[in-house]
C-alpha cells in the first residue's frame, strides 16, 4: 500500500515459529501466531524486537512445552503402573487361597472374592447383598454371633464353624475378621474364610484313634524298631498288671512265660519281617507271676517311604476261653463218668496205633469188653450204685493194662481196650486174662458187695485185607457176642476167615426175611418123654430152614445172624403162632401134647410181649393155653430178672407155663430160682453129655436136680444121647428127658406115628433112684 513501510516480520516470524515450534504443539503455535498478528495490527512492536522477542517467546514456550510433556509422560507412566497394580491386586484378591468377604455393619456381604464364591458354591451376584449368617449351620449361629459381638470389644475376631454350600452340604471353616471403614466412614468387617475340613477330619481321626487306644478292652503295646516299649494302654495294664511307667523303654521279653521256644519266636519274626504282620496265640506271664494265654496280632507301622518305624501289638486275654476249650475238649473226648477216653478219642488213637504198627511191622489187638449181668445190678440196686460199680471196674481194668495201651468206654457197660506192640496173637492173652480177672473182682458198694464178670471179643490188626478202625470194632464186638454165647466170663478171638464167609450180614437178613415170606422156614418137633413110665409128655418146637440150594439148615446157621435184629421178633412170633396151630391140628387128630417154644431175649424183652401172646392165643379160642410152654434161656432171664419175673407171672395168669432153659450155664442162685417162678427147669445138655465121664458134671446134675426138688420144680434133661445117659439120670431122680438117644427132631406129620410106637428101653424100667443120706434127714 502507498505510503506504508513493508514488514517482512510475519514471514520471518512464521518461519521461525515453524522451525522452533515442536511438531504437535499446535495449540502453542496457534497461540503464538495469534499474539504476533495482534501486535502487528496494533503496531505494538518494531522490526528490531519482533524477531528477537518472538524467538525468546518461542524458546520459553518450548521449554515450558518440554516440561509439560515430561510431566505428561510421568503421569502416563504412573497411570500405567497404577492400572497394573490394580490388575495385580484384583487377581490376587480373587485368586487368593482363602476366601475374602466384606460385610457391612448389618452382616450383609458387600463383596466376595472368587475363592469365597467357590467355597460356598455360589455366584458373586448371589452372594452380594445376602447376609453371611444364612450360610452358617444352625448349631454354629451362636459362634458367629459372638464373633460379631467381639468387634465392639476389640477381642480377637475368629471362630470355627460350619458353612453351608449351595448343594446343601456343609464344610468346616475358620473365620478371621478385621474392622475397617468405607470412604464415608461407615464400619466394615473384612472376613477371611479358611477351609479347615481336612484338619477337622484329621483331628477327628486322631481323637478316634486316641479313644480307641485308651478305651479299647484289648491290650495295646507299641514298640520302636529297637525293641523298646514306647507306649501301652490301660487294658495292657489291666491284663499284665504292669503300669505304663514300669514298662516304658523295656523289652517285651519281660512278659515271656518261657513256654515258647526260640523256634516259635523265629517263626513269628519271620512273618513280621516278610509279611508285615503276625497272628497267633502266645503264653505270657503277668506281674504277679501268673501265666496267661493271649490272642495277639503284631503289625508293622511304616512311614511314607515304607520304612518300618514301630510295631503295634494288639492282644486279648483268652485264658478263661482256653480253660473252657480244654474242658470242652475233655468232655468231647473223655467219658464223664469214668474219665476214660470215649468213642471219638478211641477212634483217633486206634487210627494212630494202626499206622504205627504198620510202620514197625508189629501187631495190635482190639478187645471189646461187655460187663455181664450189669443190667441186673442197675435194676436191683439202682443206677447210682451201677455208676459207682462202673467207675471201680474201669479203674481196675485200666490198672491191668500196660502204660501204652488204651482203655475206652464206648457204651453203658461196654469198654474197648487197644493193646499195641504185640509180637504175635498170643502176646495179648496175659492181658486179656488180667482184664477178665479185674472185672470179676468183688467190689464193696456201701453195705453191698457186688461181683460181675466180663465177656471179651478180640480181633487183630493188620489183616490180610485192608480194614478200617470201625470194622475192627465191629469184629471185636461180634467176637464178644460169641464169648457171651459160649458161657460169658471169657474171651473169644475173632475168626477173620469165617467173617469173610458171612460178610454179607445184611444180605443174609434179607434172605431170611424172604425165606419167612416164601414159607421156607419149617417146624420140627423133638419129643419129651418120661423115661421111667414111657409116657410122651410133650414136644419142643424147633425151627429149620428148608433152603432151596443148601438143603435143610439147622438153627445155628442162621438164627445168630438175626439175633439182634427186629427180624428175630418177627420169626419168634411166627414160631409161636404155627405151634398153636399145630397143637390144634394134633388135638383134632386125637393127639394131646404140650408143646414148648423157645423165646429169644429180644422177643421176651419187648414191652408188648404179653399183649402179643394174648392176641395169638385169641386166634385159637378153643385151645387150652396150658398146652403151650415158653422156654427162655437162663442168661436172658437174668439180664432183667425183675421184668422176666413179671412176664412169667402175667403169662401164668393166662394159663401159659414157663420153663427155664440151659439151667446152670449162667450165674444160677437160689435167689434167682426163687424169683423166677417157672414150672420146669431144663438141665443144659453140656452137663448131661459129659456126666458119664466127668464127676464134676455129675455133681452139678445132682445139685440141679436137688434144687428142683427143693423148689418143687419139674426137671427135664437135654442131650440124652445113649441108654447109659438115661439110666444115670433115672438113678439121680430125673425121669423127664429129650435127646438123640430118644428121638431126633422130626416134621410135625411124622410125630403122631412115633408117639404111638415109642417104648422106653427095658433098662430104664428097672433103674431105681439112688438114695442119698440127705434124703433121710
Image (tube, helix red, strand yellow):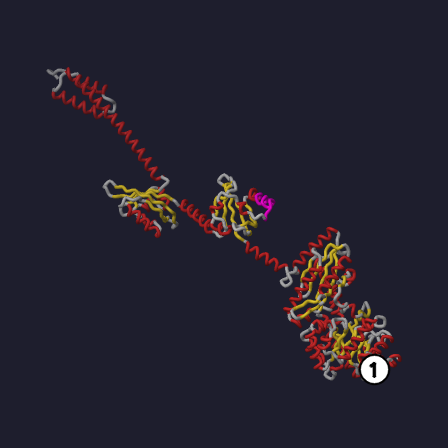
Q: Between residues 458 and 595, which one lies in front from this camera angle? A: 458
Q: Quadrant of the C terminus?
A: bottom right
Residue 406 belongs to the span the image colors magenta: no
Q: Which residue is mark 1?
A: 535
**Which residue is the extreme one toward the right?**
762
Rendered location of residue 412, percent (x, y):
66, 66
Residue 571 shows in the view: no
Rendered location of residue 464, percent (x, y):
77, 56
Residues shaded magenta: 259-270
Picture quarter containing residue 57? top left
Rendered location of residue 93, percent (x, y):
33, 39
Q: Between residues 693 and 116, which one lies in front from this camera angle? A: 693
Q: Between residues 390 and 212, which one lies in front from this camera angle? A: 390
Taking the image as shown, residue 160 lies to the left or right of residue 666, namely left
- Looking at the rendered structure, the number of numbered marks drawn on it comes to 1
* Magenta segment, prevailing SS (helix, strand or loop): helix
Rendered location of residue 509, percent (x, y):
74, 67
Q: Is residue 387 above or below residue 245?
A: below
Residue 417 shows in the view: yes
Q: Is residue 556 above or below residue 47?
A: below
Q: Quadrant of the N terminus?
A: top left
Q: Which element type, helix, strand or loop, lies under badge 1?
A: loop
Taking the image as shown, residue 229 lies to the left or right of residue 575, namely left
Q: Between residues 185 and 633, which one lies in front from this camera angle? A: 633
Q: Residue drawn 78% across and 69% down?
A: 556
Taking the image as shown, residue 100 lies to the left or right of residue 680, namely left
Picture quarter containing residue 424? bottom right
Picture quarter containing residue 682? bottom right
Give neighbour class at mark 1: few <14, some 14-19, many 20+ (Cα, 10 Å): some
Taking the image as shown, residue 307 lies to the left or right of residue 339, namely left
Q: Is residue 305 above or below residue 290?
A: above
Amino acid at each position: 500500500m502507498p505510503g506504508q513501510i513493508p514488514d517482512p516480520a510475519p514471514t520471518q516470524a512464521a518461519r521461525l515459529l515453524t522451525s522452533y515450534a515442536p511438531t504437535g504443539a499446535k495449540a502453542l503455535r496457534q497461540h503464538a501466531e495469534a499474539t504476533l498478528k495482534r501486535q502487528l495490527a496494533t503496531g505494538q512492536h518494531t522490526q528490531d524486537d519482533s524477531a528477537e522477542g518472538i524467538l525468546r517467546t518461542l524458546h520459553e514456550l518450548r521449554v515450558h512445552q518440554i516440561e509439560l510433556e515430561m510431566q505428561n509422560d510421568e503421569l502416563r507412566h504412573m497411570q500405567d503402573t497404577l492400572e497394573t497394580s490394580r490388575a495385580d491386586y484384583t487377581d490376587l484378591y480373587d485368586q487368593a487361597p482363602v476366601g475374602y468377604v466384606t460385610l457391612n455393619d448389618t452382616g450383609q456381604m458387600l463383596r466376595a472374592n472368587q475363592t469365597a464364591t467357590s467355597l460356598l458354591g455360589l455366584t458373586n451376584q448371589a452372594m452380594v447383598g445376602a447376609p453371611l449368617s444364612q450360610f452358617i449351620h444352625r448349631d454354629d449361629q451362636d459362634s458367629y454371633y459372638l464373633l460379631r459381638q467381639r468387634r465392639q470389644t476389640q477381642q480377637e475376631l475368629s471362630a470355627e464353624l460350619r458353612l453351608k454350600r449351595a448343594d446343601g452340604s456343609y464344610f468346616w471353616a475358620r473365620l478371621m475378621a478385621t474392622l475397617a471403614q468405607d470412604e464415608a466412614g461407615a464400619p466394615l468387617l473384612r472376613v477371611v474364610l479358611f477351609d479347615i475340613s481336612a484338619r477337622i477330619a484329621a483331628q477327628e481321626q486322631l481323637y478316634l484313634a486316641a479313644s480307641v487306644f485308651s478305651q479299647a478292652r484289648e491290650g495295646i503295646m507299641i514298640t520302636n524298631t529297637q525293641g523298646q516299649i514306647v507306649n501301652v494302654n490301660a487294658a495292657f495294664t489291666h491284663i499284665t498288671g504292669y503300669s505304663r511307667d514300669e514298662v516304658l523303654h523295656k523289652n517285651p521279653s519281660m512278659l515271656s512265660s518261657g513256654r515258647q521256644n526260640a523256634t516259635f519266636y523265629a517263626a513269628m519274626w519271620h512273618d513280621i519281617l516278610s509279611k508285615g504282620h503276625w497272628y497267633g496265640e502266645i503264653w505270657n506271664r503277668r506281674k504277679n507271676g501268673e501265666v496267661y494265654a493271649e490272642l495277639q496280632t503284631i503289625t508293622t507301622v511304616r512311614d511314607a517311604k515304607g520304612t518300618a518305624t514301630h510295631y503295634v501289638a494288639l492282644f486279648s486275654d483268652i485264658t478263661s476261653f482256653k480253660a473252657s476249650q480244654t474242658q470242652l475238649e475233655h468232655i468231647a473226648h473223655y467219658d464223664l463218668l469214668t474219665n476214660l477216653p470215649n468213642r471219638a478219642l478211641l477212634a483217633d488213637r486206634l487210627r494212630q496205633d494202626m499206622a504205627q504198627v504198620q510202620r514197625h511191622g508189629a501187631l495190635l489187638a482190639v478187645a471189646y469188653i461187655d460187663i455181664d449181668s450189669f443190667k441186673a445190678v442197675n435194676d436191683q440196686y439202682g443206677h447210682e450204685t451201677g455208676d459207682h460199680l462202673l467207675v471201680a471196674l474201669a479203674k481196675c481194668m485200666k490198672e491191668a493194662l500196660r502204660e501204652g495201651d488204651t482203655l475206652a468206654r464206648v457204651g453203658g457197660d461196654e469198654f474197648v481196650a487197644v493193646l499195641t506192640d504185640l509180637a504175635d496173637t498170643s502176646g495179648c492173652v496175659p492181658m486179656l486174662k488180667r482184664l477178665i480177672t479185674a472185672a470179676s473182682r468183688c467190689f464193696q458198694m456201701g453195705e453191698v458187695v457186688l461181683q460181675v464178670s466180663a465177656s471179651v471179643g478180640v480181633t487183630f490188626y493188620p489183616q490180610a485185607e485192608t480194614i478200617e478202625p470201625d470194622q475192627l470194632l465191629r469184629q471185636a464186638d461180634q467176637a464178644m457176642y460169641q464169648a457171651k454165647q459160649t458161657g460169658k466170663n471169657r474171651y473169644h478171638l475173632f475168626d477173620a476167615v469165617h467173617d469173610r464167609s458171612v460178610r454179607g450180614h445184611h444180605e443174609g437178613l434179607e434172605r431170611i426175611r424172604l425165606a419167612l415170606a416164601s414159607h421156607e422156614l419149617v417146624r420140627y418137633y423133638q419129643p419129651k418123654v418120661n423115661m421111667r413110665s414111657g409116657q410122651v409128655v410133650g414136644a419142643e418146637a424147633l425151627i429149620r430152614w428148608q433152603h432151596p440150594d443148601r438143603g435143610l439148615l439147622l438153627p445155628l446157621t442162621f438164627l445168630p445172624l438175626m439175633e439182634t435184629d427186629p427180624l428175630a421178633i418177627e420169626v419168634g412170633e411166627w414160631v409161636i403162632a404155627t405151634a398153636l396151630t399145630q397143637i390144634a391140628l394134633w388135638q383134632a387128630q386125637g393127639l394131646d401134647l404140650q408143646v414148648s417154644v423157645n423165646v429169644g431175649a429180644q422177643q421176651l424183652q419187648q414191652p408188648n410181649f404179653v399183649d402179643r401172646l394174648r392176641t395169638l392165643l385169641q386166634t385159637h379160642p378153643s385151645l387150652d393155653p396150658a398146652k403151650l410152654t415158653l422156654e427162655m434161656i437162663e442168661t436172658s432171664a437174668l439180664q432183667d430178672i425183675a421184668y422176666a419175673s413179671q412176664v412169667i407171672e402175667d403169662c401164668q395168669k393166662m394159663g401159659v407155663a414157663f420153663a427155664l432153659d440151659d439151667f446152670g450155664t449162667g450165674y444160677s442162685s437160689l435167689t434167682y430160682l426163687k424169683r423166677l417162678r417157672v414150672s420146669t427147669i431144663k438141665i443144659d445138655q453140656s452137663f448131661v453129655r459129659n456126666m458119664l465121664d466127668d464127676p464134676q458134671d455129675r455133681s452139678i446134675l445132682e445139685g440141679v436136680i436137688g434144687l428142683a426138688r427143693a423148689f418143687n420144680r419139674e426137671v427135664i434133661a437135654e442131650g440124652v444121647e445113649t441108654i447109659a445117659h438115661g439110666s444115670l439120670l433115672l438113678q439121680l431122680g430125673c425121669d423127664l428127658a429129650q435127646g438123640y438117644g430118644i428121638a431126633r427132631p422130626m416134621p410135625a406129620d411124622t410125630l403122631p406115628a412115633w408117639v404111638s410106637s415109642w417104648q422106653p428101653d427095658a433098662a430104664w424100667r428097672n433103674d431105681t433112684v439112688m438114695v442119698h443120706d440127705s434124703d433121710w434127714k
